[in-house]
Image (cartoon, rainbow, N blue to C red):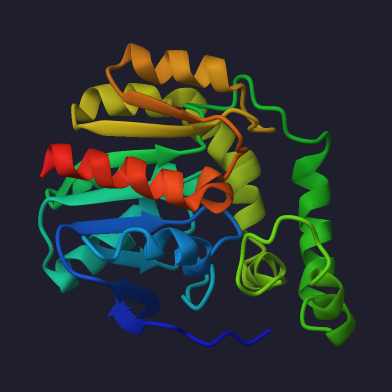
Amino acid sequence: MPRLPIGELLDVNGVAVHVRQDGAGPPLVLLHGYCGSVHWFDRLTVGLAARHRVIRVDLLGHGCTGGSSGFDAASQARMVAAVLDSLDVEDVLVAGHSFGADVAVALAAISPRVGSLVLIGQAPDYSYASFPPGSAVLLPMVSALVRRVADRRWVRFASRFRRGGWFDDPSQDLADHAVTAPAMARVVLVDRARVLAARPLDEQLAALALPCLVILGRRDRFYDCDKTFARYSAVGARVEVVEDAGHSPFLERPGEVARLLRDFRAREW
C-alpha cells in the first residue's frame, strides 16, 4: 500500500527516512509508537508549531520510512541520532509515545543533542501489562489481514463511521498498520519484553539524570496508571495524568497534551 510523504526524505546510512518539520523555535522531536507514523501527531503539532520547531520522524519500518532491519529501540535511536546530526539541532526535547518512549530514552543515552525527555503512555516494563491473550501470535495474523484490505474502498468508507475521530483521515491508523513492517510485531511483543525486564525505562531514566516529563492516560487499557505514576515519580520524573484519556492521550486530548509539553519545554529552555 503506497504512502505519500508529507515531509522530506533524508538519507541515513542508505535508508530514506521520512522527516516532517513545522514551526520555529526551540526544537521538539516527536516519535510515534508501534504501527504509528508522523500523522499521529498532526493535531498535537497544531498546538506546538507556533512556538517550537516540531520535528516528526517515521521510525524504521513505519510510515514512509524505508528499512528492512534494525527495528529494535537501540537501532531506531541510532537512526534518529543521525537525523538530529543532519538537522544540526541542539538541546532537543524528545517526546516518545509507547514504543517511541523506548526509542527516546535510548536516543538520550547516545546523543548529546538531547536535553530533556517526555514519555507518553508507556510503563517502565511489561511486569503489569494487560495485553490481550495470545497477542504475540494473533497480532501478526491480524496485521497480515489489514495489509490486504486497508486500501479497499469499502474499508475506507466504513472507517468514516468509527468512533473517536482522532485523525483527519478516518482510516489513518489502518493505513499506518498496513505499511508497518511485519517483523515489528516480534520486536514489540516478544523482544521488547525481555529488554525491558533486564533494564526498565525508570532505571534507564535514573541513570540519564535528564529532566523528564511522563504523560499518562487515566484510562490506559494496557498499563495501570497508578503503578506507572508511582514508579516514574520514584526516580524523579514529573508525572501528569490526563484524566479522560487512554493509552494515547495526545490523540484524545491534543490541546491538553500540547499545553503540558509547552509548559515543560518553557521550564527547561
In screen coordinates, is 184 left or right of 8? right
Give the total of numbered labels.
0
Q: Position of residue 47 (x, y in %)?
A: 37, 59
Q: In the image shown, does 157 or 133 lie closer to the viewer?
A: 157
Q: Position of residue 132 (x, y in %)?
A: 80, 36
Asked if 30 appears above or below 133 in the picture, the reply is below
Residue drawn at x 31%, y 45% is 261
Q: In the image shown, does 178 or 188 lie closer to the viewer?
A: 178
Q: Quadrant of the C terminus?
A: top left
Q: Position of residue 257 (x, y in %)?
A: 42, 45
Note whether residue 171 is visible: yes
Residue drawn at x 30%, y 74% is 21
Residue drawn at x 44%, y 51% is 255
Q: Quadrant of the N terminus?
A: bottom right
- Quadrant for residue 259, please give it: top left
Note whether residue 60 is visible: no
